[in-house]
Amino acid sequence: MYMGDYIEIDRNIGPFEFECSSVSTGTPFSAKVDGDKRELFLDTGWIQEHSSACRFLRPSGKRVVCTIHNASAAQCRSYRCVVFRVYSSDRKFLGTVTGTLALHTGDEELQSIWERGDRIIPWDSPDVEDRIAAYLIENGYIAE
């Protein structure tokens, strides 16, 4: 959602083609809206409401999708938006853990458990995602 702070559209070179750059590295790249997402891209209402979102994101049903997935920037291709979703034991959706290993939830109990885990999980271990999932499962949650 916040890649709008990192990706700029420098110039429109066609109806669905753009010259862009990565703000953090200054690296230029060309972006072309995927053929199957052009109608989504034309609807700019959502993007106007989310000023920090990447200019190429659009809602599609319950998801937000990248409309230039086939031509996305290197930083986008290497980034995973959601590592896993967290549910209560009765399958109620509670939040997500993103590619930066940050928890996004409004559930106070889950947030509290996360903060305790933050002190005991070695964040630099190569299997940190598995450790986080195991920790959540041990505490009665489902991590998928």
Image (cartoon, helix red, strand yellow):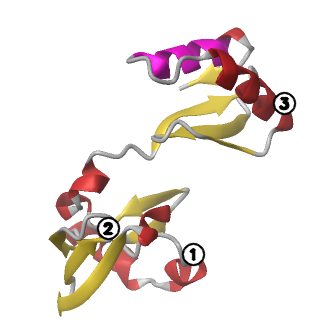
Question: What number is the disc on residue 67?
Answer: 2
Task: Give the residue at the far right of this rendering.
Answer: 108
Query: Do the residues under discs 2 and 1 have CB atoms within 8 angstroms?
Result: no
Q: Which of 71 and 90 is in front in this view?
A: 71
**Residue that badge 3 annotates:** 109
39 horizontally vs 70: left or right: right
Of callouts 2 and 1, the N-terminal one? 1
**Whole-percent x and y of residue 9?**
29, 82
Query: Do the residues under discs 3 and 2 have CB atoms within 8 angstroms?
Result: no
Question: What number is the disc on residue 79?
Answer: none
Q: Which of marks 3 and 2 is in front?
A: 3
Residue in the picture at 41% in, 60% down: 65
Name the secondary structure under disc 2. Answer: loop
Residue in the picture at 19% in, 73% down: 31
**Residue that badge 1 annotates:** 50
Q: Which of marks 2 and 1 is in front?
A: 1
Q: Give the residue type that dot 2 points to.
A: Thr
Q: How far apart are marks 3 and 1 (CA)?
A: 28 Å
Up/down of 37 relative to 70, above or below: below
Of callouts 3 and 2, the N-terminal one? 2
Question: Can residue 53 be seen from the camera position used here?
Answer: yes
Mark 1, Cα crowd under 10 Å, few <14 / some 14-19 / many 20+, is: some
Name the secondary structure under disc 3. Answer: helix
Mark 2, Cα crowd under 10 Å, few <14 / some 14-19 / many 20+, is: many
**Whole-percent x and y of residue 53?**
49, 70
Q: Give the residue type that dot 1 points to.
A: His
Q: Give the residue type that dot 3 points to.
A: Glu
Q: Magenta stretch?
A: 127-137
